[in-house]
Image: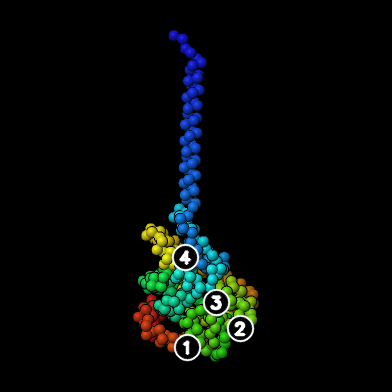
Amino acid sequence: MSIDMDAGSRKGKGKWILVCAVALVLSATGFILLYFQRDRETVPEYVFTYAENQTQDYPTTLAGLRFAQLVEERTQGRIQIQVRPEGIMGSETEVIRQMQYGGIDFARVSIAQMSDFIPEMNVLQLPYLYEDSAHMWRVLDGEIGDRFLQYPKEYGLVGLSWYDAGARSLYCSTRPIRTLEDMQGLRIRVQEAEMMSEMMNALGAVAVQIPYDQVYAALERKQVDGAENNWSSYETMQHYEVAGYYTVDEHIRIPEMQICAQHTWELLTETDREIILECARESALYERQLWTEHERAAREHALQSRVEEIYLSDAEKEKFQAAMDPIYQQYYEEFGKDIEEIFAQGTKGRE
Ligand code: GCU
């Protein structure tokens, strides 16, 4: 028997060519599949806008970005949320209005600006309502907080989660505020909300509603004598440069809410809604962590910049609190039950 060596090697060669060809086809197919798969993942089904009026490195903005990132990851890129900070989408009041018509999809807003649209929100921002931050979080993390997240629904908005904004105090450019008497006749900037004007007028000052991004100019031009806000906003917006007397009266804690436009919500499946709610809650916990440190650093920086920090005596603080009685009377009629429930979550009790 003779062996045709050439034929054998030809056969072997042929086999190799076949193997290589198959491998080539397979890898090309794999590549094409991968390409289309990747393409499908990177082309989002929805690109949503998210309005934020704080600067890029502010805790609420960073948490908004975390929210967007989580949503994108958990929907495999199907839902993209573009966070637009620094108020470029308009003032909070304008943003809320636009959201009711579906012009903006998401936002983080102070509930003060929501309260003229959604009167129930006034309950959670009554002056001197919470004993401290822990009291406020017991309320917001509990049944009351969940209930209030549902109210925006009747007004074309969906409440997603609560963000922290600390306590707000008074600051002035002309003189330190040490007593209730010092408040008389001062022109003080307040947020665009009826209750904020009522509160300031009840303290004997003249309330002037001005959007957040215009406060610095108003202080500088002496259109107002002072304003009120938390340490973080006071420092970030550089109000300390033009109003150097900061009185730690902590007259109010105003929770902030992440919201979604009802129009946008209706586009989403039940699964996507759950993902969004879950990511919003996670971003809110992140915001709370960032908040504490930011507030501390902001205060320190303001004090280094020659801000005078003033504390009210206990007797004066009581006077400030007592001045709010008419406001409680006014809101008690409609919301007495809610207010009582909130007091009951405190530790000191209240008459
Ligand atoms: C805080 C809050 C803002 C709000 C601002 C204001 O900084 O975070 O959302 O606009 O107060 O005083 O208007």
Report which residue position mark 3 lands on: 211
- Closer to the chain start, of discs 1 and 4, is 4
Instruction: Give the number of marks.
Output: 4
Q: In this view, does 208 lie above or below 41?
A: below
- Closer to the chain start, of discs 1 and 3, is 3
Q: Residues within 10 Å of mark 1 (few under 14, many from 20)?
A: some
Q: Residues within 10 Å of mark 4 (few under 14, many from 20)?
A: many
Q: Which of 154 and 103 is in front in this view?
A: 103
Q: x and y percent of residue 125 in the render?
A: 45, 78
Q: x and y percent of residue 32 in the render?
A: 49, 41
The nearer-to-camera label among 1 and 2 is: 2
Alpha carbons under labels 1 and 3: distance apart = 25 Å
Outermost residue toward the top in this view = 1
Report which residue position mark 2 lands on: 223
- Closer to the chain start, of discs 1 and 2, is 2
Whether disc 3's CB lies below 8 Å from ligand 1 is answered: yes
The residue under label 1 is which amino acid type?
Answer: Ala
Q: Quadrant of the N terminus?
A: top left
Report which residue position mark 1 lands on: 323
Q: Give me the residue at 46% from left, 58% from top.
A: 46
Q: Quadrant of the C terminus?
A: bottom left
Report which residue position mark 4 lands on: 105
The nearer-to-camera label among 1 and 3 is: 3
Alpha carbons under labels 1 and 4: distance apart = 39 Å
